[in-house]
Image (tube, rainbow, N blue to C red):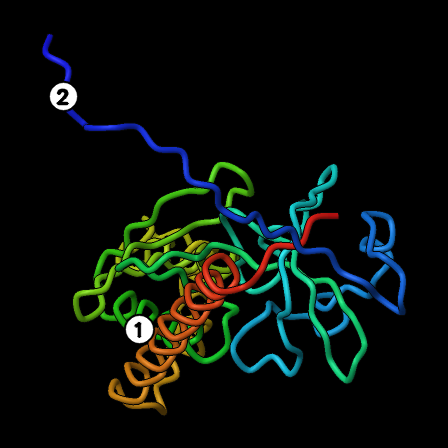
């Protein structure tokens, strides 16, 4: 194996910058950092571009189960970094997350406001019209989910257990003359009619879903930008 000719070897001295933080004139230690008010708990949100505080640094400190609240705030996921913030000269600590990532798929639950109700309405209309509604099962809580293709976007729709039962009930069969089952089918159809929001147009339901998807895409972009801001443009503080 031939060794490449790289020329002369030089060692160049470069300055090493080590940042430390002070709060109230005291050097910020790991203990003091943990005692700072947690921005995410105070404001119940991630650090997004509309945050009123300034992100001043990120720290190289983690502690046992410091990411145990993953997923609690706005679908936070992935790696995380702890940061220092300042608002009106008051220090806070916070957490930013590297996720959710940009992807084609969208997760919507039946309890997610208008979008969730809109998808449930569309499925209920299909069921009433005699279409077969196929579902998968979550192992962890036995709830049901549905795969939906919406204008080129894949939606995984997690459905309320009661609605899912109605969507899976056999409305087409005569039930062999069983009056009890026939009555149950009528009651199921009645509930589905309410879920179907027949007073709304298809266009209205689609618009509600589109607005949710747009908001989710914007949110994912915000999370990505904040992660890049912290990891690439914000100084690191050593505690």
Q: Going by the picture, which residue comes out furthest to the top?
A: 1
- Calculate the distance from the C-alpha at mark 2 to the C-alpha at mark 1: 66 Å
Q: Residue at x 87, y 57 (%)?
A: 35
Marks 2 and 1, the one that precedes in the sequence: 2
**Numbered disc 2: secondary structure:** loop
Say which residue label 2 marks.
Answer: 4
User: Residue 208 appears in which quarter of the rendering?
Assistant: bottom left
> Which one is nearer the viewer's eye here, 85 or 168?
85
Count all numbered tags in the image, as a single digit.
Answer: 2
User: Residue 182 appears in which quarter of the rendering?
Assistant: bottom left
At label 1, counting other C-alpha atoms closer than 10 Å, the crowd grade (few under 14, some 14-19, many 20 or more) is some
Query: Residue 128 at x, y = what percent?
Result: 29, 70
Q: Is residue 218 above or below residue 109?
A: below
Q: Residue at x 86, y 48 (%)?
A: 31
Dots 2, 1 in contact, CB < 8 A: no
Query: Residue 223 at x, y = what percent?
Result: 46, 66
> Which one is nearer the viewer's eye here, 50 or 135?
50
Query: Residue 77 at x, y = what percent?
Result: 51, 52
């Amino acid at each position: 194996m031939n060794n490449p000719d790289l020329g002369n070897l030089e060692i160049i001295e470069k300055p090493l910058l080590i940042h430390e933080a002070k709060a109230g004139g005291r050097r910020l230690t790991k203990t003091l950092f943990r005692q700072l008010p947690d921005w995410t708990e105070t404001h119940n949100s991630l650090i997004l571009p509309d945050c009123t505080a300034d992100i001043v640094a990120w720290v190289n400190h983690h502690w046992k189960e410091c990411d145990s609240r993953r997923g609690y705030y706005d679908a936070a996921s992935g790696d995380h970094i702890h940061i220092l913030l300042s608002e009106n000269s008051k220090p806070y600590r916070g957490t930013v997350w590297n996720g959710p990532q940009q992807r084609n798929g969208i997760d919507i639950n039946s309890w997610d406001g208008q979008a969730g109700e809109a998808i449930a309405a569309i499925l209920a209309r299909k069921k009433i019209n005699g279409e077969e509604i196929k579902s998968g099962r979550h192992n962890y809580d036995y709830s049901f989910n549905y795969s939906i293709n919406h204008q080129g976007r894949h939606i995984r729709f997690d459905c309320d257990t009661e609605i899912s039962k109605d969507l899976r009930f056999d409305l087409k069969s005569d039930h062999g003359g069983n009056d009890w089952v026939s009555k149950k089918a009528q009651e199921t159809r009645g509930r589905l009619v309410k879920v179907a929001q027949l007073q709304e147009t298809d266009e209205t339901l689609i618009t509600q879903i589109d607005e949710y998807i747009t908001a989710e895409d914007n949110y994912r972009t915000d999370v990505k930008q904040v992660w890049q801001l912290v990891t690439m443009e914000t100084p690191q503080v050593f505690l």
